Image: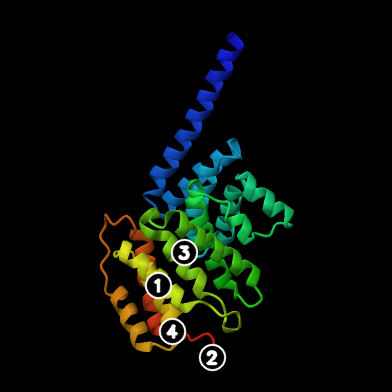
């Protein structure tokens, strides 16, 4: 009985420790507009993963934190989107059905594997898709059809199981994934537009989906009037100090300004 009681006490202590690490990391993450605070949050989450290597919540938090860091803070040699994707996939691999199918396919993330995922992995699906898409966009997507299929599948599944998660962020992920393919791979620009518009309708103060719509859909379609209107709208926004999306919105405004200076990028005309 004493041994059983001691084991139970140890489990409670371990559970309490992992919860404390999550709480401390989350508190710092909410101050992510300061890169030092975001880095502190990442260090808390990393310490948690070292202590609890199978904890999906901690790996999901790292996928989110590294994605946001790579998107919103200046590059400093860290390949944040790749790291975010790695932690997101590690989170998803803790699901036995998904992990088994990916391993049996030699590490490939198939539609069949993604369809085994449920709402308890919504954060990992969403942030992994976003990180993977932006990683692909930064390196060019020619010949990346397998990667595109995976990131589209993850975003589609996230929309299917809990599209309202985090104020519609799965729709923003889906719009980005659908729009990235080069012309030979037949991107679904109409679907991307619907997804971006849905994301904006759910969270109208969130500016990144508007910039993504302009850059990846309006410009490619040759709709210069819409492209200009969307980016001018974002450029003129004033972000409140208490805006929960302040960091990402400020980054979106800087993107809008840079795109307006550069002019529409049709991509396919190259």
User: Dot 3 corresponds to which residue?
Assistant: 173
Q: Marks 2 and 4: in contact by CB < 8 Å?
A: no
Instruction: Give the CA distance from mark 4 to mark 2.
Output: 11 Å
x 50%, y 62%: residue: 156
N-terminal label among 1 and 4: 1
Image coordinates of residue 191 in percent, x first then y, are 45, 74
N-terminal label among 3 and 2: 3
Element under disc 2: loop
Instruction: Give the CA distance from mark 3 to mark 2.
Output: 25 Å
Task: Find the residue positioned furthest to the top.
Answer: 1
Image coordinates of residue 12 in percent, x first then y, are 50, 24
x 29%, y 65%: residue: 204
Q: Is residue 11 above or below residue 159?
A: above
Q: Nearer the viewer, mark 1 or mark 2?
A: 1
Element under disc 4: helix
Instruction: Give the CA distance from mark 3 to mark 4.
Output: 19 Å
Image coordinates of residue 90 in percent, x first then y, are 61, 49
User: Dot 2 corresponds to which residue?
Assistant: 269
N-terminal label among 3 and 4: 3
């Amino acid at each position: 009985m004493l041994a059983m009681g001691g084991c139970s006490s140890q489990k409670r202590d371990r559970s309490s420790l992992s919860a404390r690490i999550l709480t401390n990391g989350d508190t710092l993450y909410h101050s992510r507009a300061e890169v030092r605070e975001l880095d502190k949050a990442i260090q808390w989450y990393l310490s948690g993963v070292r202590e609890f290597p199978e904890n999906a919540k901690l790996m999901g938090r790292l996928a989110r934190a590294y994605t946001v860091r790579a998107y919103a803070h200046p590059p400093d040699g860290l390949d944040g989107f790749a790291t975010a994707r790695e932690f997101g996939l590690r989170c998803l691999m803790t699901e036995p059905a998904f992990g088994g199918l990916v391993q049996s396919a030699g590490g490939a993330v198939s539609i069949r594997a993604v369809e085994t995922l449920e709402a308890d992995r919504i954060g990992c699906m969403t942030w992994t898709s976003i990180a993977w898409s932006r990683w692909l966009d930064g390196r060019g997507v020619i010949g990346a059809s397998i990667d595109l299929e995976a990131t589209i599948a993850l975003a589609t599944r996230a929309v299917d199981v809990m599209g309202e998660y985090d104020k519609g962020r799965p729709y923003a992920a889906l719009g980005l994934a659908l729009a990235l393919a080069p012309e030979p791979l037949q991107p679904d620009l109409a679907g991307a537009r619907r997804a971006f518009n849905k994301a904006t309708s759910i969270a109208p103060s969130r500016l990144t989906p508007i910039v993504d719509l302009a850059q990846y859909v309006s410009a490619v379609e040759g709709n210069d009037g819409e492209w200009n209107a969307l980016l001018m709208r974002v450029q003129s926004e004033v972000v409140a100090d208490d805006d929960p999306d302040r960091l990402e919105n400020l980054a979106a405004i800087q993107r809008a300004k840079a795109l307006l200076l550069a002019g529409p990028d049709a991509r396919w005309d190259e």
